[in-house]
Amino acid sequence: MCLILVGWRVHRDFPLIVAANRDEFHGRPAAAASFWSDRPGILAGRDLQARGTWMGVSRSGRFAAVTNYRGAREPSAAESRGALVARFLETATAPAAYVRAIEANAYSGFNLLAADGRELWWMSNRAGAPRQLEPGVYGLANLLLDSPDVEANKARFAAVIDPAPAIEPLFTLLAEARIVNPEYGTRCSTVLLQSKEPRTRYAERSFSPDGTEQETVQFEF
């Protein structure tokens, strides 16, 4: 189960706080977070099979993340869900316009979060219309937004970011939700802190199939 926890405008100094685990088959090749050589405005890890990403930010402060929707087995769609994140990060399109223009049927089931510093939107092609999110704490896994399976982690996240968020305590929180399995498990954990200046701190910690920490990369801009 992937997990994304979001604090949107709940902290006076950090309008956007994100802590996320990416769970995936260990055999699927991926690169650690970096600024992409072919799209230098994007900071994100990269799925080397489909060339998209599960979560990232742009130099201009845009943020997006995607999870698969867990349901009945579906035929492979022509479009990669990771492309939804990459396309949003490299455009200047407002989140509302971007999510409303997505051809939902072109993708297997997904949830998408997209923010530009002013607005945060959630869209799923397994739900109704896209929704602008009000200030609050949100949780997203492989069902719909704020499904019951994320409530406990939302509560822990809210406690960790009060009175001030920090990278290591958020990594500790994510460690409690990690999956360790030789075939499929937590490949990396990511923490994003965006302050009002605006300044962005982005940290990613990757893991081997046996759960051993491999490396941590951090960026600030």
Image (tube, rainbow, N blue to C red):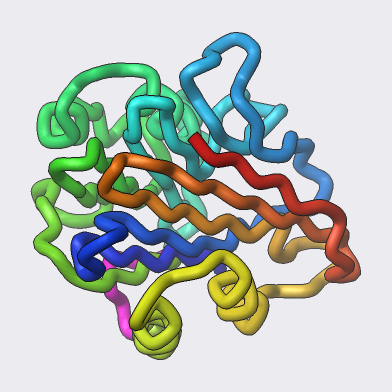
Q: Residue at x 71, y 56 (%)?
A: 205
Quadrant (top left/top right/bottom left/bottom right) for the N terminus: bottom right
Q: Residue furthest top?
A: 38
Q: Residue at x 53, y 58 (%)?
A: 191
Q: Residue at x 48, y 63 (%)?
A: 19
- Of residues 30 and 190, the one drawn nearer to the viewer in this rendering: 190
Residue 49 percent across, percent down from the top left: 70, 28
Q: Is residue 61 above or below residue 6?
A: above
Residue 168 at x, y percent in the picture: 62, 70
Asked if residue 76 lies in the magenta stretch, the reply is: no
Total marks drawn?
0
Instruction: Kindly give the residue lying farthest to the front in the view shown.
Output: 197
The quadrant where residue 60 appears: top left
Please report the bounds of the magenta region as a residue range.
142-148
Q: Position of residue 83 (x, y in %)?
A: 46, 27
Asked if residue 11 is positioned above or below residue 117 in the image, the reply reads below
Taking the image as shown, residue 137 lies to the left or right of residue 193, namely left
Assign the magenta stretch its main secondary structure.
Answer: loop
Q: Is residue 62 left or right of residue 131?
A: right
Out of 141 and 38, give the one closest to the viewer: 38
Q: Nearer the viewer, residue 47 or 154?
A: 154
